[in-house]
Image: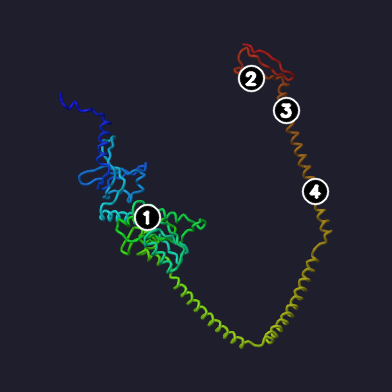
Amino acid sequence: MNADTNNPVYSVSEFSHVIKKFVETNFSYIRIRGEISRPSFPGSGHVYFTLKDTDGTIAAIIWKYTLPRLSIKPEEGIEVICTGKVTTFAGQSKYQIIVESMEVAGEGALLKMLEDRRKKLLQEGLFKQEYKKAIPYLPEKIGVITSPSGAVLKDILHRLSDRFPSHVYLWPVAVQGEGSAQQISNAIDKFNQLTNETTIKKPDLLIVARGGGSLEDLWSFNEEIVVRSVFKSSIPVISAIGHETDTTLIDFVSDLRAPTPTAAAEKAVPVRDELIARVDELNLRFKTSFNNKLNNNKDRLNSLIKLLGKPDQIFESKIQNLDFMYKDFESLFKEIFVEKKNTITQYAQRLLPPKILITNLVSKHQLLETKFKNYLENIVNSKETKLNSLNQLLESSSFNRVLERGFALVMDLKGKPIKQSSEAPKNANVNIKFSDETRSGTLDT
């Protein structure tokens, strides 16, 4: 007998459980580097993909509650380092890694991912100049989205205070690491949901800022969720990420890019002292111009007064002209009045007295009434004669007159006339109508 027969016999499910326990015990926590292939995003919210290199592959899963905590979103072709637990899936006899965190493997992969994403968003039109909003010249309320700690916020507040003190709303966010992109996007969206009726009023301008750092440190500002929130913002946005040499995708979509957070504050508001000086200068120029204009008008008025004569002399000639015009109008009015009066008199003579008009109308009415009565009487007589003729004709063609001449009408019991012998069966009961009465009978065979 073969010695192997002493080994225990496992069912398939028992053996799968043994392997699962062995793998999870010996590889409870592991980091694997590879390229993401065929990522799948089903309706469950989980993410399924394959990690591969030149010689092998391994299945990977990201549970939906883990996905929001990841610093990057799984995309086809990205080389990443996945950290998580290795387990087995008995249904397909394969092993897989449950991903708990993910990072891009190397700056080269990040740059490729950044360029691919930039081209995609550029093709969608998110960077077009026509969509950019004008920065308000003097915003009353400014929303700042940045980390509450560090020098960035202090630099912005200090620079605003120096130039033109403004009302600042701070929305504190993490500016790098897991979940930071979601926080930044949420801050932009929430600022846009404010109105003038809410407790916190809607800002006139947003500044999204952070200090310098590596490509990985600034990566949150390259995430699509942040770029799309800036694009959808109805509030103008100034981006101030890193140093002047740092460029992120948010810089392409924002309405204005500032090389540094301090520069963002400078672009947000003018210098108050310069505005005051400019107002004073304009005020002085206005006063000088006004006084010069006033003096010139006074001189011109005096010159015109000298050219005018005495008021009494001016009005005397005008009054005299008015008197002449009055006389002319009075004479003209009298002539018109007399002419119209004569015309009315002529028309009045042509009119007949009302009594004569009424008498004529009464006579005309009586004549028409007599004509109408005669016409109506002729019509009635004509119709009566025609009616008598028709009555005589009807009487001569009457059914009863035919019966009086010796004819009889044979009918069935329902009163229907029998015109031909074929319409009545043999021995049928019939009614026979004579001129004086109706008798019944039976037809012979």
Q: Amino acid at mark 1?
A: Ala
Give the mark, 1 or 3, whose residue is nearer the N terminus: 1
Query: Residue 105 appears at what percent x and percent y?
Result: 26, 52
Per the rendering, the mark at residue 396 is 3
Location of residue 43 with respect to 367 vertically, above or below: above
Per the rendering, the mark at residue 369 is 4
Q: Amino acid at mark 3?
A: Ser
Location of residue 328 with respect to 228 vertically, above or below: below
Q: CA distance from mark 1 to mark 2?
A: 114 Å
Badge 3 vs badge 4, beta-carbon distance below 8 Å:
no
Give the mark, 1 or 2, whose residue is nearer the N terminus: 1
Badge 2 vs badge 3, beta-carbon distance below 8 Å:
no
Q: Amino acid at mark 4?
A: Glu
Q: Label 3: few (<14), some or many (≥20) within 10 Å? A: few
Per the rendering, the mark at residue 418 is 2
Query: Residue 204 appears at what percent x and percent y?
Result: 46, 61
Query: Residue 438 appears at what percent x and percent y?
Result: 71, 17
Give the mark, 1 or 4, whose residue is nearer the N terminus: 1
Q: CA distance from mark 2 to mark 4?
A: 59 Å
Give the mark, 2 or 3, whose residue is nearer the N terminus: 3
